Image (cartoon, grey):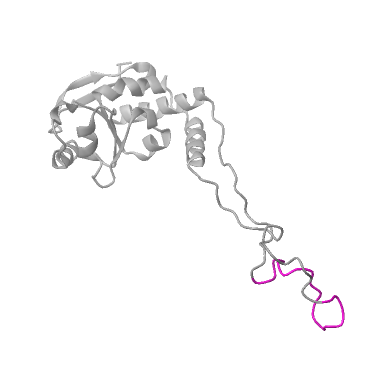
Amino acid sequence: MAAPKAPLLDSDGKKAKDVTLEESVFAAELKPHVVHETVRAEMNASRQGTRAAKSRSLVSGGRAKPWRQKGTGRARAGTTRAPQWTGGGVAFPPTPRDFDVKVNRKTRRAAMRGVLTSHAENGSLAILDSAGFQAPSTKLAVSLIEAHGMELPLVVVTKDEPNVVKSFRNIDKVVVTTPGELEVAALVWARSVLVTEDALDLVKDKAT
């Protein structure tokens, strides 16, 4: 089986050459259940889980019995903080919780390799030569995306490439991230992936 390859694009979106990719990362087996488990864990980790309300024991006031037990003709009541009272507590209120789901590091990396392999096989993965971005230029970034026919791209850059970050971050439906913050969910969402040459090795390290 031939080694996986990806085109190396210049700042104009033209292919300079084909880059041979590492088979252990870009020619791995795609396991849908592993990808689903990892994406679910990443989405759960992004949930704040801070939704809460006060129960009758947490609402202030209502310590005195509002009226005597018998003789008033009204229903008996022991506190004004009961759920049926205006300003009272909530019955079975939501409380802060943690939605985190544990996924082993080995499973997470296998999922990332599988999704990267899928992009490599579908031809939706490209490598960017960032040397052409001597200064931030959104116009140049837009022309690159249009020239290569990218759709909903995910751009992966290093922190040492600010010109590339500033060029792509203002484009609608384009997500810019670093290898350290790269998630499987973002790779699944993206219909195409653009990785700079400097970021490529860091992506390999995160997937192995």
Asked which quadrant contains residue 54, the reply is bottom right
Q: Give the image quarter of residue 206.
A: top left
Nearest the camera: 33 or 200?
200
In the picture, the quarter occupied by the N terminus is top left
Q: Along the line of sight, which residue is nearer the eye, 2 or 132?
A: 132
Eyeballing the image, is 15 above or below 142?
A: above
Q: Tell which of 177 and 207 is nearer to you.
A: 177
Q: How many circles with numbers are drawn on the protein?
A: 0
| Residue 34 percent coordinates (x, y) | 50, 30
Q: Nearer the viewer, residue 109 or 18?
A: 109
Residue 147 placed where, x, y %? 15, 38
Specify whether 44 is left or right of 180. right
Query: Image height check: is 152 above or below 83?
Result: above
Q: What is the magenta range?
A: 68-86
**Which residue appears at 24% of the width and 23% of the height?**
197
The answer to whether residue 93 is above or below residue 31 is below
Is residue 74 part of the magenta span, yes or no? Answer: yes
Say if the magenta span includes residue 134.
no
Q: Is residue 27 visible?
A: no
Q: Position of residue 110 (x, y in %)?
A: 46, 24
Quarter of the C terminus within the rendering: top left
Q: Does residue 55 appear anywhere in the picture?
A: yes
Locate residue 7 relative to residue 41 in the image: left or right: left
Dominant secondary structure, magenta: loop
